[in-house]
Amino acid sequence: MMLRVENIETFYGETQALFGTSIEVGAAEVVTLLGPNGAGKTTTIRSILGLSHPRSGRISFDGQDLTHMPPHRISRLGISWVPDDRRVFPSLNGKRNLALGTRKTRFRSWTEAEVVEIFPALEHLLNRECENMSGGELQMVAISRALLGSPGLVLFDEPSQGLAPKIVQDVMRTVSRLKAAGISSLIVEQNALAALEVSDRVYVMDRGRILHEGAAQELLDNAPLRRRLIGM
Ligand code: ATP
């Protein structure tokens, strides 16, 4: 297993957000975590990134225990994050934003030219300031920056939020390209069937607990199960 989240309980002050959450992501595996507002998806990502340490349970990545590690050390192990609000520097161009995300890990390194080869649309964004980019273009920069961080695992927080359906398809295609390059992905979404189409497995959570775990294809094929779990 690349990522193993075992039975974690994470709190905000005295408010408990996760109640024994367990998730696994294998090498070059794509996993989607679905759930409604407030289910605990973002808290799960924050726990993995070391931004909210679990009070109990264990998280390991690539064989290393990161349960209590600070975020900067976790990122150096090869976990990249594509935040829902993209977090680019608006006044800097695409090239500078990518340079700021570049990092070496034990996983394969990528050059800017290689990333442009995977995402040809990126070429036009290198010299443009991020404040002059559309939502889809910013998402492309955020994903490219994640790749330049030499990840073994990329965490996508609501990647389709605010994007037109066609752009969402483009984003999901890039997840498949990362998988082909041997990179694992964990995608967090409220209700995106598009994510299931590129995923191997899916977890559904609500109120801090995992309700369902299974093959993504099963949820796509089984409409009654899907309606019961995610209401669509
Ligand atoms: P969304 O889709 O809205 O992002 P989510 O599934 O990511 O939802 P979380 O943001 O992880 O859910 O929230 C899980 C629980 O933790 C919710 O009950 C929420 O109210 C609570 N929570 C989240 N952030 C905080 C915080 N900073 N302080 C206190 N409680 C919080």
Image (spheres, rainbow, N blue to C red):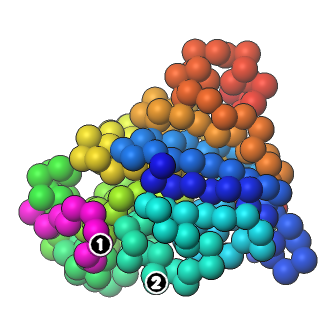
Q: Which label belongs to residue 149? A: none
Say whether residue 62 is magenta: no
For the point 29% across and 72% down, which residue is it?
105
**Residues under labels 2 and 1: Cα distance?**
12 Å
Q: Nearer the viewer, residue 227 or 51?
A: 51
Q: Nearer the viewer, residue 151 or 116?
A: 151
- Relative to residue 200, is residue 135 depicted above or below? below
For the point 69% across and 24% down, which residue is it?
226
On the rendered structure, is 143 left or right of 204?
left
Viewport quadrant of the C terminus? top right
Q: Quadrant of residue 128?
A: bottom left
Per the image, the residue denoted by label 1 is: 105
- Dot 1 amino acid type: Thr
- The location of residue 36, given as percent across then percent down, is 74, 46
- The location of residue 92, given as percent across then percent down, is 28, 83
Per the image, the residue denoted by label 2 is: 72
- How dense is the environment of label 2, judged by Cα within 10 Å: few (below 14), some, or many (20 and up)? few
Q: Nearer the viewer, residue 93 or 12?
A: 12
Which of the two labelled residues, at mark 2 and mark 1, occupies the earlier sequence position? Answer: 2
Q: Nearer the viewer, residue 165 or 68?
A: 68
Looking at the image, can residue 7 be seen?
yes
On the rendered structure, is 107 left or right of 217?
left
On the rendered structure, is 34 left or right of 7?
left
For the point 68% across and 56% down, which residue is it?
6
The main secondary structure of the magenta stretch is loop
- The location of residue 104, given as percent across then percent down, is 25, 75
Q: Which residues are magenta?
A: 103-113
Q: Residue furthest right?
A: 14
